[in-house]
Amino acid sequence: MTDAEIDALETPDAWSGTFDARSESVLRFTDAMCGETHALDPALVAELRTHFSETELAELVLVAGQANLNNRAGNAAKQLLGD
């Protein structure tokens, strides 16, 4: 990744000017996975299906889900157990 891409990760409004459509759709998906996953935008789902096979989509769900679990468990552990 370039420095510009790393900097843009923190600002979703900058994604479209920095990443290609495929990468941007993954970023929006992973961002959505951190929220109410039962409410994924149907347009995002359709877009992802244009870029990825069913197998690739399953892998994206698992990788994003695992990263989200690790972050949430780590945050909870820090609050409960301290540094």
Image: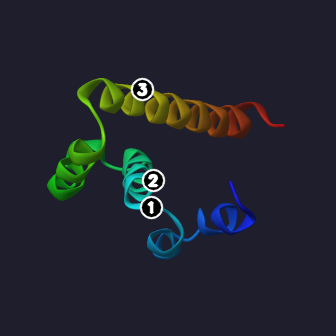
Q: Is residue 23 visible?
A: yes
**What's the residue type where badge 1 is placed?**
Asp
Point out residue 19 in the picture as x, y percentages from the top left corner.
Answer: 50, 63
* Residue 72: percent from left, percent from top: 56, 37
Q: Residue at x 39, y 44 (%)?
A: 33
- Horizontal side of residue 3 vs 26, given as left or right: right
Q: Residues within 10 Å of mark 3 (few under 14, many from 20)?
A: few
Crowd rating for badge 1 (residues with CA inside 10 Å; few <14, some 14–19, many 20+): few
Q: Which mark is residue 20?
A: 1
**Residue placed under numbered mark 2 in the picture:** 23
Label 2 element class:
helix
Residue 42 disc label: none
Q: Are marks 2 and 3 in contact (CB under 8 Å)?
A: no
- The structure's colour scheme is rainbow
The span from disc 2 to disc 1 (Cα, nearest Å) is 5 Å
Provide residue 69's location: percent of width, then percent of height: 52, 31
- Above or below, 20 relative to 56: below
Residue for point 69% across, 33% down: 80
Q: Position of residue 60 (x, y in %)?
A: 40, 33
The residue under label 3 is 62
In the structure shown, which secondary structural element does the residue marked by tag 3 occupy?
Answer: helix
Along the horizontal axis of the image, is 36 left or right of 30?
left
Q: Which of the two marks, 2 or 3, is nearer to us in this view? A: 2
Are discs 2 and 1 less than 8 Å apart at CB?
A: yes
Judge whether residue 40 can be spotted in this image: no
